[in-house]
Image (cartoon, rainbow, N blue to C red):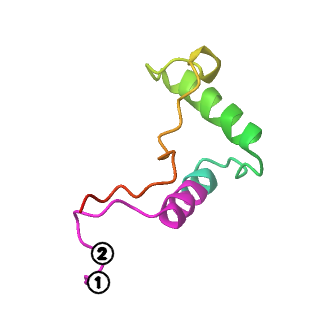
């Protein structure tokens, strides 16, 4: 496989790459690719339960707080 300069091992996969990977895994598992967030959550939860995944059900988790920067100022310090 040819190494592309921008695809270094230090960089995380892109959202497009993760979606493509998920689509291939769904096809291999003979599962339809979810079309909505609800379908995706239900499929994830079902597969986690079927495989004995240690993570709690999605309903058992507290909502995550946004990590977005709030406020109008710049984060750069002069």
x then y, percent, for residue 67: 47, 40
Estimate the spatial distance between the alpha carbons at disc 1 and disc 2, rounded to whole Å: 5 Å
Q: For residue 39, which numbered disc appears in the image?
A: none
Secondary structure category for the residue under label 2: loop
The quadrant of the image that shows the C terminus is bottom left
x then y, percent, for residue 42: 70, 32
The quadrant of the image that shows the N terminus is bottom left
Secondary structure category for the residue under label 1: loop
x then y, percent, for residue 3: 25, 82
Relative horizontal placement of residue 71, taking residue 43 as reference (left or right): left
* Label 1 sits on residue: 4
Seen at 57% across and 21% down, the residue is: 49
Q: Residues within 10 Å of mark 2 (few under 14, many from 20)?
A: few
Seen at 56% across and 54% down, the residue is: 22
Seen at 34% across and 59% down, the residue is: 12
Q: Is residue 55 above or below residue 75?
A: above
Relative horizontal placement of residue 55, taking residue 27 as reference (left or right): left
Seen at 56% across and 18% down, the residue is: 61
Q: Nearer the viewer, residue 11 or 68?
A: 68
Name the outermost residue toward the top.
60
Q: Are marks 1 and 2 in contact (CB under 8 Å)?
A: yes
Q: Nearer the viewer, residue 70 or 54?
A: 70
Is residue 17 magenta-colored? yes
Q: Is residue 1 above or below residue 12?
A: below
Q: Residues within 10 Å of mark 1 (few under 14, many from 20)?
A: few
Tell me which segment is drawn in magenta.
1-24
Q: For residue 7, which numbered disc appears in the image?
A: 2
x then y, percent, for residue 39: 75, 40
């Amino acid at each position: 496989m040819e190494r592309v300069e921008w695809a270094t091992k230090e960089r995380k996969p892109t959202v497009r790459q993760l979606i493509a990977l998920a689509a291939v895994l769904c096809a291999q598992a003979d599962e339809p690719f979810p079309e909505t967030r609800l379908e995706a959550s239900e499929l994830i939860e079902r597969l986690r339960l079927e495989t004995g995944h240690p993570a709690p059900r999605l309903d058992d988790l507290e909502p995550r707080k946004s990590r977005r920067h709030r406020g109008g100022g710049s984060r750069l310090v002069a």
